[in-house]
Amino acid sequence: MTLEGDNMMGVKRNNRSAALRILHEKGGMSRKRLAESMKLTPAAITKIVGEMLSEGLLMEGEAVSNGTAGRREIMVRLNERHACALGLLINIPWTVISAVWLDGTTVFSETLPLERGSPAEPTVQRLCARLMELSEQHGLTPEQIVGVGVAVRGVTSLDGRSSANSFGAFAERGYPLCERVEALTGLRVVMTNNVRALFAAHMFLSHDEAAGSQFFLRCEYGIGASLSIDGKIWHGVTEQCAEIGHIPVVRRGGKPCACGKSGCLETISSPTAIREDALAILSPERTPVLWKLSEDRGADTLTLEDVLNAACNGDEGAAEVVDRAVSTLAFALKSVIYLVDPDKIVLYGRMFDHPYYLSRLLSEVREGVDSGHAVEIRTSPYNHQLEDKAASLLAVEDFFDNGGIR
């Protein structure tokens, strides 16, 4: 069968994309090894590599021995500085404007406040104007920029073009976020929800750790999660896969949640909920350590870390709040283990840096889970380091998926 037109272009894009992915994951590789990895002929690889070398997307490196007495093989690798991508991570109470090179190295990152219920249009106009201003200040040319990645809090539309429900970041629902960013920047835009973007960044930077199935749990302002199957992030039928933070865990009388329901897991186990619940019982009797800190500094200055420290240093009330949060979250994670049976559970958030909290959570999760579920649970090696590149990396991934063809 002869492939022509669109079919040939599709094959070309797929082959180029596969080559870019392999070189990103493995680093430098000879044409021969690349052909073996992709199961293509040497002639086909020579053509693919030659095109990308002429474009500047790849570069040749050192010559290495092939293990025989024959000629040495020239290594080829990704030219990470050939192009860059821009990003907008939209969350509460802040947004992040960023740019990265093709290997994920940050070009710039700036954090700006975002008040709950901000009007979408003027907010996006302000963010895009600042994004393009920073790009110009850092000497990025339009020819270098492959696109803009947008990571937005909440639920996106089925076509991945609109913010269906930002859970309070924007005042409006159904805002055409991709369309507006494209109009304001003149660049190609790809979008997903913020937690999926963080998970995608974790997998991108982990290189070969993306294989298998993983459940990514983020606990910062609230609770979010994302699931990968065979190295691919699963979105679900309604773009709401792995919304673990909004599982209702209190049947009646639960606290209101940002999603519009009440009694969600997030209202008990999120960092915000833990801090609020501890402050609600602040007293010399129940929380003496926290009380002393509040007298010295003021109650408004007390942080989640203060609550966790108090819980492990004798505050009975603080310990009760933390234990309830931990046991409720652990129950949800045990459900994930039995339902999904993932290879790994990846924890992301500052609270997982706290030894007391992490040890309590791991102990609770392991209790009642049989030995047949040998899931690895660990904190991301990039814990609280991905916000300044996650959105931008969406556009890098899109560039790779498109075979580096703009």
Image: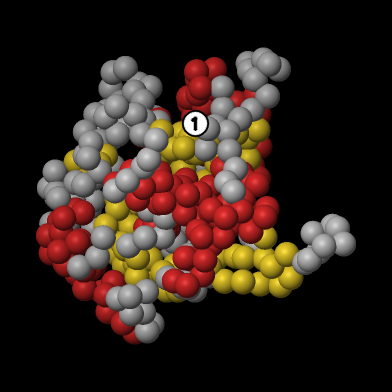
Residue 83 spot, x, y in % from top left: 42, 70
Residue 176 spot, x, y in % from top left: 14, 50
Image quadrant occupied by the N terminus:
top left
The residue that appears at 35% across and 65% down in the rendered structure is 146
Quarter of the image for residue 158 reads: top left
Residue 202 spot, x, y in % from top left: 52, 50
Say left or right for 256 vs 301: left
Q: Residues within 10 Å of mark 1 (few under 14, many from 20)?
A: some
Image quadrant occupied by the C terminus:
bottom left
Q: Which is more toward the observer, 118 or 306? A: 118
Q: Which is more toward the observer, 132 or 75? A: 75
The residue where tag 1 is placed is: 229
Q: Which is more toward the observer, 330 or 90? A: 90
The residue that appears at 22% across and 40% down in the rendered structure is 159
Vertical placement of residue 280 versus 151, above or below: above
Residue 56 spot, x, y in % from top left: 48, 73
Residue at the front extreme? 1
